[in-house]
Amino acid sequence: MPDIVHLLPDSIANQIAAGEVIQRPASVVKELVENAIDAGATHIQIIIKDAGRTLIQVIDNGKGMSATDARMAFERHATSKIQSADDLFSLKTMGFRGEALPSIAAIAHVEVKTRRAEDEVGTLLAIAGSRVEKQEAVSCAAGTSISVKNIFFNVPARRKFLKSNEVERRNIFYEIERIVLVNPDLEFSLTENDVQTLQLPPAGLRQRIVQLEGKGINQQLIEINEETTLGKIYGYVSKPENAKKGRASQFFFVNGRYIRHPYFHRAVTTAFEPLIPANENPAYFIYFDVDPASIDINIHPTKTEVKFENEQTMWQVLLVTVKEALGKFNAVPSIDFDREDAVDIPIYDASRKAPMPKVNIDPTYNPFRTSPGDMQRPQKNNLDWEKLYHGFENEKSPSGEPNTGGQPLESLFYKTPDNPSETGISPEHYQYKQRYILTSVKSGLMMIDQHRAHVRILFDKYLAQINSKKGVSQRVLFPEVIQLSASESVALSAIANDMEAVGFELSDLGGNAFAVQGVPSEIGNADPVALIRSMIEKSMETALDVKSEIQESIALALARLTAIPYGKTLSLEEMLLLVNQLFACKTPNHTPDGQTVISVITDDEIVKKMK
């Protein structure tokens, strides 16, 4: 029987290894940009076409590579940084040329142009599927330019599972955000489909955050800065009043590397708990500078998860640091004794006697008199309450029920007007606690949730408008300006057409700022900026790909925000209209996300409760 265990060819082994490092176009961008930073570049240019499917090119002005280094960088396990296993636990750099290039070359067409400053000519290297196709001398600028074309061309199963261009583009922006936030002193530019969409000149940390998140965040940031024996913690957190209900900008960095750390996230949210509602999230940009030997960055292939040696102690330090910053900048309510309008507190003087306070009273005041000159008891109220029950207790109808003199029972307690909506009470419909509509049906008593019913109605309406692109837009007299972050601007572009179909009209002002020129006519007095932000956050949270799912998400988000709220009193006409529109829907019993709209209490259940 022949042996069945054998070594894989390098090309296949590289493809398997690539699956650990290269998951999507954003992974290629991350690896190439980090390599450029390690090469000492001060200006990094990123060029993208078709969200990275067709082309990803990173050009830097770093130190470049020799012909031999360029060739060796694409060999498995080649490196310029590690000499022994101990070096794995003390790395301070992002990556190195030999870490990611073999994986990238295994699943794409790669072309490298590189030259060191001291060399007269550079090197051109072309590789496809781990196979070197060309290596020759070439004239090029100092630094390195790496072009990655046709990602996953030889792994069709992986290419098939790439998301839409908008989703992949959004993930590229996320990776760029994480890199540029830890390198504010470097210049970055991003060009997409021959259009420059991002230009970040060198700046300070606060200015770099403003460049990415928009000018509005500048007044929201509170600085944190603490240095202990465990390391240094610094950065910014947002003011409590600027917390968001949806996704907020939340970043942790350790030694210049982005990480995810749910345990430390809990420390930050614990500091904010007394100051913000439970469903809102603060923004934060927090940096740790610690001894590389005290952390382990090799617990995940993408190195976004880090294990700290003293996590519990660092958790407590982070909590205290954030709390101190919030208190220092008056985020925590406190008594201010230095206010100009504060009440002056007199100095105690023992020689001065305080006068006895006097209270002026009127001994002739009678609270029961009806007029100032009348000291008699008020006259008996003209309403004769005994008549209300006249004949009610002694007379019985043939059915055995109390005789009400031919009047409906409710008329004994409520004055029935010509227009029943004046009281909100009608034999057909009744609003209970400004939340439910009660109405009788053949089988019993029906309860309808007014907010959910309106969500069901509006969802179908908005979805039909999106599909037919017939949403009615109402022009605003004074356009509002909404300032977005770079990632929010990318998310907006993905849903812009569907928002326009609903009735929103936005004009691009540049710099990720947009003017709201028109809004759907149905939104009433709702805040259009809040609606737009909510839909953008929903799009970013769900990261939907299929067009129909994106449209449904927009329709549901808009329906929830514009539906009749709980606590609103409805007239009889409004209740009738709502019920009629609800039962005109194809699925009136549940909201689009499965919440119950209608519940019926049967006659048998009512009888049982009354026994």
Image (cartoon, rainbow, N blue to C red):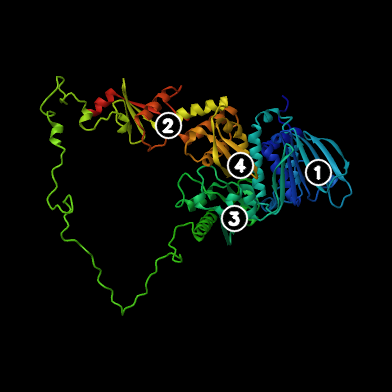
Does 62 sit left or right of 424 as displayed?
right
Which numbered dot is residue 452? 2
Residue position for label 1: 72
In the rendered structure, which amino acid carries the disc numbered 1? Met
- 229 left or right of 435 in image: right
Q: Position of residue 254 (x, y in %)?
A: 62, 52
Residue 420 in sight: yes
- Which label's residue is closer to the chain start, 2 or 3? 3
- Name the secondary structure under disc 2: helix
Quarter holding the C terminus is top left
**Are circles 1 and 3 on residues that touch, CB within 8 Å?**
no
User: Relative to 115, is 130 above or below?
Assistant: above
Image x and y of residue 236, in percent: 57, 54
- Give the number of the mark in front: 4 or 1: 4
Along the polypeptide, which appears first: circle 4 or circle 2? 2
Q: Which residue is mark 4?
A: 514
Q: Residue at x 55, y 31 (%)?
A: 502
Helix, strand or loop at label 3? It is strand
